[in-house]
Amino acid sequence: MMKIDITEQFELLPRAPIVEAVIQVHARPESSWEEKDISECLKPKLPDYQKHFSRNRVTQEVKLVPAHSPQASEQSLSWHGLLCQSKDETQSVQFNRDGFVFSRLQPYQSWDQFFGEAMRLWKIYLETARPTEMQRIGLRFINKIQLPPKEADFEKYIQPYPEPPFNLELPFLSFFHHDTLAVPGYPYAINIIRTIQPATNPQAEGIGLIVDIDAFTTQPFEIKDGVLEERLAELRWLKDKTFFGSITSRAMELFR
């Protein structure tokens, strides 16, 4: 059985292909969740996140009527939460009716910076929402491996790579591969998505290979000191182990 070892060291890549890193915690507020009260409470605590957007729950419906075009409608429901972005829009935080989300876009600096800011903002969410249980903790890293122009042999960069049907040696135009892995002995699972992002300018850049890794918990946890930090440390190990096991030595050279 695999054993999680959070002391294991992984290579620090100067040009890591991370395009977005996300920490998400599903938790239900115990406090009253009213837009005016929550917004007035949060905004003064977030001087570095000056762009604010209210978010409502919506329902969408499509009606199919014979001999007529489909009719789509959208209905706004209750207030869901507040989305706050930094001035340069590289960092965003969501304080929602169903939980907390912190996101960092390129350039990703370091785990310490990313984790430290997420924990600072999580404490603000705790003070405001006062949840007692975390239903799900997720750590998601979306990576983009940018291939050189006119490079078509993507199998040299990711593993395992997709193969065409037996005895049908045809090139791929695209692929989408989604795996979900259990972690025996631990309350975790991992979603791994590998896909192709076509080049917007084939003459200047090659295709992009997306390796999207989402490590998450499979059971709820009571909110106590140190619990979220401990779970994220183990999810980070799973994420790193998955990433370095999904790329080849040739891809590593792109990131060094």
Image (cartoon, rainbow, N blue to C red):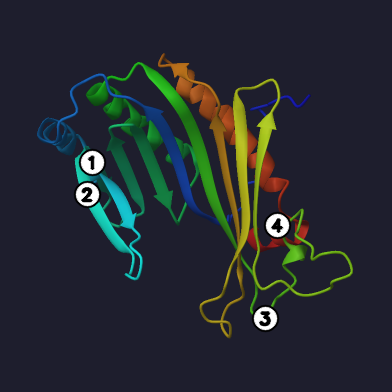
- Where does residue 147 sit, x and y in percent of width and height? 64, 70
Residue 214: quarter of image: top right
Does any portion of residue 133 appear in the rendered image?
yes
The CA distance from mark 1 to mark 4 is 38 Å
Label 2 neighbour load within 10 Å: few <14, some 14-19, many 20+: few
Position above or below: 91 against 210: above
Q: Nearer the viewer, mark 3 or mark 1?
A: 1
> Would residue 244 appear left or right of 48 to someone viewing this image?
right
Does any portion of residue 47 appear in the rendered image?
no
Along the line of sight, the residue nearer the viewer: 246 or 30: 30
Q: Amino acid at mark 1?
A: Leu
Looking at this view, name the residue that lies furthest to the front: 66
Position above or below: 44 against 142: above
Pointer 2 and pointer 3: residues touching (CB < 8 Å)?
no
Pointer 1 and pointer 4: residues touching (CB < 8 Å)?
no
On residue 75, the disc is 2
> Would residue 36 appear left or right of 1 to someone viewing this image?
left
Kindly identify the residue that appears in the image at 62 percent across and 60 percent down: 195
The CA distance from mark 1 to mark 2 is 19 Å
The disc, 1 or 2, on the residue closer to the chain's N-terminal end is 2
Label 1 neighbour load within 10 Å: few <14, some 14-19, many 20+: many
On residue 82, the disc is 1
Label 3 neighbour load within 10 Å: few <14, some 14-19, many 20+: few
The CA distance from mark 4 to mark 2 is 47 Å
- Where does residue 109 sit, x and y in percent of width and height? 47, 49
Q: Which residue is mark 3?
A: 150
Q: Which residue is mark 4?
A: 252
The disc, 4 or 2, on the residue closer to the chain's N-terminal end is 2
Q: Nearer the viewer, mark 4 or mark 2?
A: 2
Q: Amino acid at mark 2?
A: Gln
